[in-house]
């Protein structure tokens, strides 16, 4: 019984983890959504470097 509960708990955690991972949109179907996804997932250091280069 304990093994079954542990296995069930691991399965639930794995499914929640996989559901929480966002996937990038298809660039061919929706280029605007793809560009927005890429902009929102840039590292903060990259954004800061872009701001400092603009000055």
Image (cartoon, grey):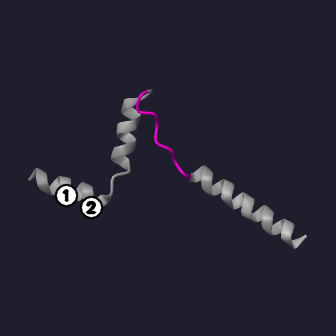
- Find out whether the residues at labels 1 and 2 contact each other: C-beta distance under 8 Å: yes
Residue 54 is left or right of residue 42, and the answer is: left
Splitting the image into 4 quarters, where does residue 33 fall? top left
Q: Residue at image x 41%, y 28%?
A: 28
Residue 45 is left or right of residue 38, and the answer is: left
Q: Residue at image x 50%, y 44%?
A: 23
Q: How far across and down, in percent of the image, does residue 9 sit?
A: 76, 64
Q: Residues within 10 Å of mark 2 (few under 14, many from 20)?
A: few
Q: How far across and down, in percent of the image, does residue 6 sit?
A: 79, 69
Q: Which residue is mark 2?
A: 45
Q: Residue at image x 37%, y 48%?
A: 40
Residue furthest to the left: 55
Q: Is residue 41 above or below residue 34?
A: below
Residue furthest to the top: 29
Q: How far across and down, in percent of the image, does residue 54 sit?
A: 12, 50
Residue 49: which disc? 1
Q: For numbered disc 2, what is the local secondary structure?
A: helix
Q: Residues within 10 Å of mark 1 (few under 14, many from 20)?
A: few
| Stretch of the chain drawn in magenta | 21-28
Q: Where the N terminus falls, by quadrant? A: bottom right
Real-space Cα distance between discs 1 and 2?
6 Å
Residue 35: which disc? none
Query: Number of labelled discs?
Result: 2
Q: How far across and down, in percent of the image, does residue 35 sit?
A: 35, 38
Nearest the viewer among 52 and 6 is: 6
Q: State the predominant SS element of the stretch in magenta.
A: loop
Residue 32 is left or right of residue 3, and the answer is: left
Q: For numbered disc 1, what is the local secondary structure?
A: helix
Q: Residue at image x 86%, y 66%?
A: 4
Residue 3 is left or right of residue 51, and the answer is: right
Residue furthest to the bottom: 2
The verdict on residue 13 being magenta is no
């Amino acid at each position: 019984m304990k093994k079954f509960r542990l296995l069930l708990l691991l399965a639930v955690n794995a499914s929640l983890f996989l559901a929480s991972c966002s996937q990038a949109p298809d660039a061919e179907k929706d280029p605007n959504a793809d560009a927005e996804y890429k902009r929102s997932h840039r590292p903060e250091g990259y954004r800061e470097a872009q701001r400092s280069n603009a000055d």
